Image (cartoon, rainbow, N blue to C red):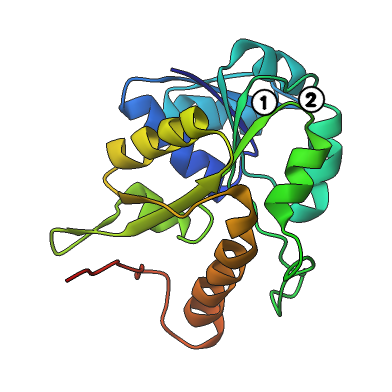
Amino acid sequence: MNIGILGSGNVGGALGRRFSAAGHRVIFGSRNPQSEEMRKLAAETGASTAASAETVRASGVVVLSTPWGATESVLKSSGDFAGKVLIDVTNPLLPDLSGLAIGTTTSGAEQVAAWAPGARVVKAFNAVGFNVMLNPKFDGNSAALFYCGDDAAAKQVAHQLASELGFDARDAGPLTQARVLEPFAMLWVSLAIKQGYGREFAFQLMKR
């Protein structure tokens, strides 16, 4: 697949590294694609860099991993998302990580869909740390990765990508399910950072 990534922080970098290693063509989009930071990221991940709008044009799948405060401006300055599979990895976190800026009756993912008209939005990869993205195995068991969206084919793309990385990928339903997946991410954040669990943990789904 041709995968574009908007967002070059820890999460975007981890996913770019893993997708590139899995054989996908990865492009990081940036306002400054030739900056030293972006060149270093490309060298470390085996990806390339381009302007954000060019990245979106060249990619069938776009991964959105921006800080919440920058998400609207990045989407609106990155061109036409119509028909693109847009995997929303963001969470509408407050700056001090004390809670969510959006929730209960809507979600960040639904807002992303409004900011990127025509995109086939799937919420995924939002409730695990970037370190777990690099290695989702715990004593041979796979961390659960929940995703949701309204487009079945787009969700299948997210399922495939998550499975390729070693996650136990699980369909959580329509995009409105982001209203529970984003608070679920807040649980991970609060346990990892404020309750002393550290980053080396993930959730698992057990059935009987």
Q: Which numbered disc covers residue 29?
A: 1
Instruction: Determine which quarter of the picture holds residue 40.
Output: top right
Q: Residues within 10 Å of mark 1 (few under 14, many from 20)?
A: many
Task: Identify which residue is drawn at 75% across, 54% down.
Answer: 68
Instruction: Determine which quarter of the picture holds residue 14.
Output: top left
Residue bearing mark 2: 78
Asked if labels 1 and 2 touch by Cβ distance under 8 angstroms, the answer is yes
- Pick the residue in front: 135 or 166: 166
Task: Identify which residue is drawn at 60% across, 71% down.
Answer: 183
Of pointers 2 and 1, the one earlier in the residue sequence: 1
Instruction: Determine which quarter of the picture holds residue 22.
Output: top left
Element under label 2? loop
Quadrant, the C terminus: bottom left
Residue furthest left as drawn: 140
Compared across the picture, whether 137 is left or right of 194 comes to left
Three-letter amino acid code of the residue under disc 1:
Gly
Percent of width and height locating residue 140: 13, 59
- Pick the residue in front: 180 or 54: 180
57 shown above or below 17: above
Percent of width and height locating residue 168: 28, 52
Three-letter amino acid code of the residue under disc 2:
Ser
- Pick the residue in front: 121 or 14: 121
Q: Residues within 10 Å of mark 2 (few under 14, many from 20)?
A: many
Compared across the picture, whether 161 is left or right of 118 comes to left
